[in-house]
Structure formats: C-alpha cells, structure tokens
Image (cartoon, rainbow, N blue to C red):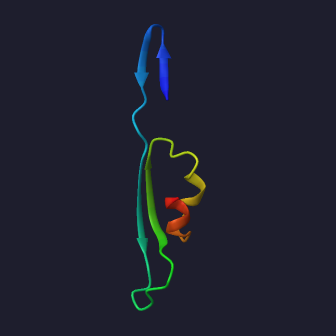
Amino acid sequence: MHEHTGNVSIPRPPDVVTILWERNPLDRQAPRTIVEATVIGRANPCGGSLAQGKRYRTAAH
C-alpha cells in the first residue's frame, strides 16, 4: 500500500469507485443493474464486475 522511495514512504491514496445503477420502478424485486461506473485508482479486484448491464450487488461485494 505504500511506495518506497529511498528512506521516504509515500502512502497511496485510496481508490474511489462510483456506481450509477437503475432498477425497474414497477418491480421492487427486479435486480439493480449498473448504468455507469467511474474508477479513480486501481479498484482491484472489482474492475471486471463494473461493466454496464452487470448486477450492482455483485460489484458492491
């Protein structure tokens, strides 16, 4: 989590992930699906589950 440069340790800033999701408003049991996702940083290991149309719950976990 830290990068080392000589005797100085520089902490890496936290990753930030925002997820815009939607659900069918007429069906409360419908799954939430990803409309758009933005990543600042690496977002490992969730990068593959952030695609449009994928389930929000899978990406959130």
* Drawn side of residue 8 relative to residue 51, left or right: left
Q: Quadrant of residue 20?
A: bottom left
Q: Is residue 30 above or below residue 61?
A: below
* Drawn side of residue 29 relative to residue 45, left or right: left
* Drawn side of residue 3 relative to residue 16, left or right: right
Most extreme residue toward the top, as rendered?
7
- In the image, residue 51 lies at what x, y percent? 55, 62
Q: Is residue 45 above or below residue 29?
A: above
Most extreme residue toward the bottom, as rendered?
26
Q: Residue at x 50, y 83 (%)?
A: 30
Relative depth, front residue between 51 and 59: 59
Q: Residue at x 60, y 55 (%)?
A: 48
Q: Is residue 58 above or below residue 26?
A: above
- In the image, residue 29 lies at what x, y percent? 48, 85
Q: Is residue 10 above or below residue 22?
A: above
Q: How many marks?
A: 0
- In the image, residue 37 lies at what x, y percent? 45, 59
Q: Residue at x 51, y 46 (%)?
A: 43
Q: Residue at x 39, y 34 (%)?
A: 13
- In the image, residue 44 lies at what x, y percent? 55, 45
